[in-house]
Amino acid sequence: MTSPVARNDIVVGTGADPAVADTIVELLTLGLSAWTEHDADRRRKILADCCAPDVVYVSPLGAATGLDQFTDLIGVGQRSYPGYRPVRTTAIDLHHRHARLEWAFRDSAGGPLLPGSTSSSSATSP
């Protein structure tokens, strides 16, 4: 059993593979970038590069299953909160094949709106 280890802005906890930490950070960062892409086709491509085809997303904005619905839901968020962008507000906590982080929409002056959290898990075995 491994003890939690802090590594920059990543906390690698019990049951996590430190070797995949950088990949997880890249995927989560790419996923957040989809929220700033206004072209739906490019946004769907970003999501396809970092999410499973049957991704499930649930937040106060709504729920989506699959890449098409997730792409559309992000578009709704962009239209509802123009000028806001998602930013990670905590370290990424990795443990037992799961990743967790907190985020918030921020305006151009850094003001927060809609704080939230994200959890993801890997469905495949190591």
Image (cartoon, helix red, strand yellow):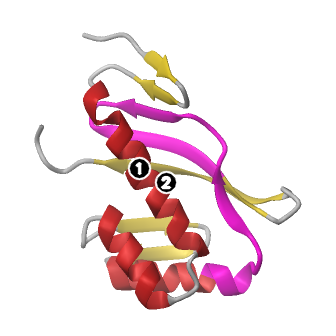
Q: Which residue is mark 1?
A: 26
Residue contact at pointers 2 and 1, CB within 8 angstroms: yes
User: How far across and down, in percent of the image, does residue 48 sit?
Assistant: 31, 72
Query: In front here: 24 or 67?
Result: 24
Q: Residue 17: percent from the left, percent from the top?
A: 26, 27
Judged left or right of residue 69, residue 103 is right
Name the image quarter holding the N terminus. Answer: top left
Q: Secondary structure at mark 1?
A: helix
Q: In this rendering, is residue 104 above or below 6? A: below
33 displayed left or right of 94: right
Q: Disc 2 to disc 1, how far (Cα)?
A: 5 Å
Residue at 74% x, 70% y: name it: 84
Q: Residue under circle 2?
A: 29
Q: Quadrant of the C terminus?
A: top left
List x then y, in percent, for residue 113.
78, 62
Q: Is residue 16 visible?
A: no
Q: In the rendered structure, which segment of residues is drawn in magenta?
A: 77-103
| Residue occupying the point 60% across, 85% down | 76
Q: What amino acid is at disc 2?
A: Thr
Residue visible at 40% across and 41% down?
A: 99
- Amino acid bearing label 1: Glu
Q: Nearer the viewer, residue 99 or 17?
A: 17
